[in-house]
Image (tube, helix red, strand yellow):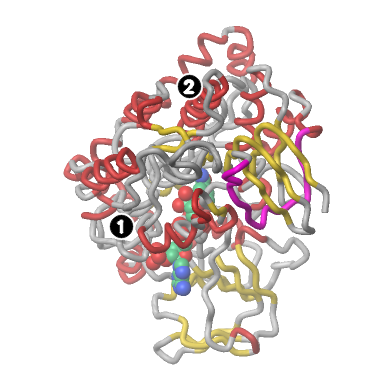
Amino acid sequence: MTVHRTNTLIIGTGFSGLGMAMQLLDRGRADFLVLEKAESIGGTWRDNTYPGCACDVPSHLYSYSFEPNPNWSQMWSGQPEILHYLQGLVDKYQLDRHIRFGTECTGGYWDEVESRWHITVAGGDEYVAQFLVSGVGALHVPSTPVLAGIDTFEGAAFHSARWDHEVDLAGKNVAVIGTGASAVQLVPQLVDTVASLQLYQRSPAWVLPRSNFAIPEPVRRAFRQLPLLRRLFRDSIYWLAEGMALGLNGHSNLLRPIEFAARRFIAREVRDPELRRKLTPDYRIGCKRILGSNSYYSALTRSNAEVVTDGIAEVRARSIVSSDGSERDVDVIIYATGFHVTDGFESVNVAGVGGKKLVPQWKAHGIQTHLGIAAAGYPNAFFLLGPNTGLGHNSVVFMIEQQIKYVLQAIDFIDGSVAEALTVRQKVQNEFTADIQRKLSVGVWSTGGCSSWYLDSQGVNRTVWPGFTWQYWLRTRKFEPADYEVVVPRGLGANSGATSESEDVLA
Ligand code: NAP
């Protein structure tokens, strides 16, 4: 076993981990390493390569403010261009020398004597660091339903985030399961290639019209030459998106006009009343992520497409039997069934003060942190895109940036003090949790009449930030040392190994 020592250990090379790495370098803090389980960078933008994969947030906003790209070719860029953008930044900052590829974090613990994190990786090596930053995100562990009889299926079956490019879909009978953001993008790409497309729908999504468009070269040139113009464009997109926040957070009547537009869109696109009925949601728009596509509904009206709303009863060698007893020929099954979200943090199941493992704590009490960033009892550990910092209306890259700035302030504060480690006070974490849960209780995700992956198994919203994103900026803008307490190394002082004022009760 080799032990590697560093000041700051980052896990993951998606938008979060790479952003953190770049900002550390920008501050002259080169003593850091980044662990990446795969052999290349990109996180979700490496893993998702399904046909039509793109970001549904405009690219000028879904990119770092400190690394703007005036050259985005489209309003909503595809996965290859986003991955290219990230790779370009890795090259520019020479991050390769900090990244350890093929290095999967398997666990770790806070050493209470040394005041350091010890993180173990597959293969047995250990990484020791004063600061630990998780950039693992929430949408990286595919969720695949266990279907009765799936073991007998003789065709190919794969998840949208693990697309099997070896499988030729031309002329095949293809079953797509799920109707979320991924399905809406991939279904229109497949329908003209396959012999038949069966879309197994548990509940329909609200879909708004959206036509992507190329950003013409003269506009890109103007963005290159006039950074202020590009900034104005980005800011306009941001404030337009913020306009949705009121409706999502307690004023769902404001969403009615948008829902009306979505109904009109279905009516225009889908002439068959039975298909229209199937595709029209019975919950308030915004309760699940609002999707945008100009080609989804029209794809489903094709003669070779069918929307199956009866659940899957059984999979056979070359077919699927739905709960009404109908049997349809199937050569390939594609799971567009989303991700393990509230349990997606298992890859950072570290033990904190007193040896308490993070994941069992979160399983027992729900995922709780302060500001979605720091968890009481886990000193010097920070989560990027942690709980309740996801969004239904704006760019998560904005949230990541606020978190990075906060973490940098925390690190600077610790460096400038006599303390080796701080942990957020349990009371502060409890108050934050109570506050956001009170706000979320009136949010459309809870009141809109749907179930979604925003809610955990107890029905508590552990994923979305309630309110405007500028409110998050306001709350994270200044690191408040008073929210934290010093962790005294074991062997020093009366309360050694424990926090000085711990209220060991989760809300
Ligand atoms: P998702 O939104 O969680 O959708 C999963 C779909 O699978 C839902 O329609 C769900 O039905 C269905 N499903 C799950 N288990 C099922 C089962 N056992 N039987 C039948 N249907 C089942 O997943 P996703 O589409 O992969 O998207 C996940 C998230 O990734 C998005 O919300 C978004 O945040 C992100 N994403 C973003 C983009 C982008 O452009 N930025 C693109 C793709 C994904 P129910 O609705 O009934 O639960």
- Corner quadrant of residue 316: bottom right
Q: Identify the residue under disc 2.
A: 234
Could you say where residue 440 lies in the image, as x and y percent from the top left? 25, 47
Q: Does dot 1 land on a helix, a strand or a loop?
A: loop
Crowd rating for badge 1 (residues with CA inside 10 Å; few <14, some 14–19, many 20+): some
Q: Is residue 390 inside the magenta stretch?
A: no
Q: What residue is drawn where x is 61% and y is 46%?
A: 111
Could you say where residue 225 lies in the image, as x and y percent from the top left? 62, 8
Q: Does dot 2 land on a helix, a strand or a loop?
A: helix
Q: Nearer the viewer, residue 278 or 141?
A: 141
- Corner quadrant of residue 473: top left
Crowd rating for badge 2 (residues with CA inside 10 Å; few <14, some 14–19, many 20+): some
Q: What residue is drawn where x is 47% and y is 27%?
A: 406
| Residue 238 visible | yes
Amino acid tagged 2: Arg
Q: Nearer the viewer, residue 136 or 122?
A: 122
Amino acid tagged 1: Val
Q: Identify the residue under disc 1.
A: 460
Which contiguous range is marked in magenta?
98-113
Mark 1: is the Cβ under 8 angstroms from ligand 1?
A: no
- Corner quadrant of residue 75: top right
Question: Is 433 located above or below residue 311 in the figure?
Answer: above
Could you say where residue 493 lies in the image, as x and y percent from the top left? 48, 36
Q: Nearer the viewer, residue 146 or 164?
A: 146
Q: Nearer the viewer, residue 65 or 103?
A: 103
Lower sequence index among marks 1 and 2:
2
> Relative to residue 117, is residue 354 drawn left or right?
left
